Image (cartoon, rainbow, N blue to C red):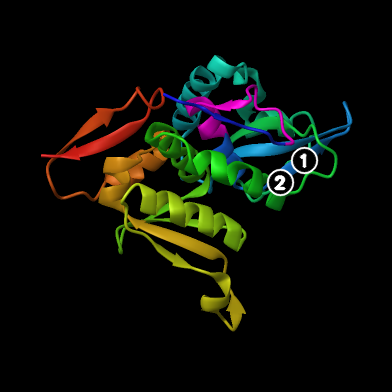
Amino acid sequence: MELQPLTIGLDIGTTLINQPAGYILGLLVNNEKFFNQYNNTTYWQASIRHNPKQATINEIESHLNLIREITQKIGMDTQFNVVDFYKQRDIKIQKFNAGKQGIIGAISQTEPNYEFSKFISDIKIPILNSPIEIKKAFLCGVFDGRSAYDKTAKFISLDFEGEDVGELLRQLFESLGIDYNINYSRERKQGGKPRKNQIRIKHIPFLTEIGYISPAKFAKATINITDDYEIINDSEILTGLKKIKLL
């Protein structure tokens, strides 16, 4: 497998995009940061976020253990902790208010004034030129981070920031032959105000081709499948990656 070189203003433990790096880069598409006053360092949050009562403590801890096993290969396992780890140290993390729980990987910024748009620009070509396994690891990170399952329409949805992110996701899904639908904020009105950009994928194609590391998100996305299927553990892509195979 030919690995693409990576040059970004963040330390993810490697300068080549392998599967663990792809997964971390996917988590970083959430575009969240915090500043640690104890070491005067800006960190980007590689976040997995759950709304209240959407994941059990056991599911979150199981997910954390899998992430640490995945990222140990590039020396980043100690950077990942549950949200309470940061709250107990009075570190002001983003977007985990109102009882939200989950996991954060603290990824240090190495380039001053490094912006999210530059990050997307820096990773776009290397990700698109990567082997299929790494593309899927990246998408697994993106959707592990903050996607949701709509049990009525039976699709996996993801809110995202910036049309550059939408373009990257569009090209990735097209390269993998997976159908999708994108609605940009200017097209999505709620009460006269634009809603966030969103991409949607039918749950069966997503679960057969991409899957989840997150035990909570995998359980929710498979609860209403009426067809017979078996669970596939695709450890060749990522440790703990669960997908389905229709029978």
The residue stretch that appears in magenta: 9-24
What kind of element bears circle 2? loop
- Amino acid type at circle 1 is Phe
Whether tag 2 and tag 1 are in contact, CB under 8 A, the answer is: yes
The disc, 2 or 1, on the residue closer to the chain's N-terminal end is 1
The residue tagged 2 is 94
- Mark 2 vs mark 1, CA separation in Å: 7 Å
Q: Is residue 111 left or right of residue 212?
A: right
Does residue 52 lie above or below 57 as drawn? below
Residue 92 visible in the snapshot: no
- Front one among 35 and 95: 35
Q: Quadrant of residue 9?
A: top right
Quick check: is 21 in the magenta stretch?
yes
Residue 89 in view here = yes
- Side of 35 relative to 204 (left or right): right
Q: In this orientation, which residue lies closer to the viewer: 86 or 232?
A: 232
Q: Between residues 8 and 32, which one lies in front from this camera angle?
A: 8
- Residue 78 is situated, as x and y percent measured from the top left of the image, at 64, 18
Q: Determine the residue positioned at 30% across, 64% down.
A: 153
* Residue 83 located within the stretch drawn in magenta: no
At label 2, the amino acid type is: Gln
Residue drawn at the location 52% of the way across and 42% of the way down? 145
In the rendered view, tell whether residue 39 sits above or below residue 220: above
Dot 1 falls on a residue whose secondary structure is strand
Quarter-of-image position of residue 237:
top left
Please name the residue that numbered disc 1 is placed on: 34
Disc 1 crowd rating (10 Å Cα; few below 14, some 14-19, many 20+) is some
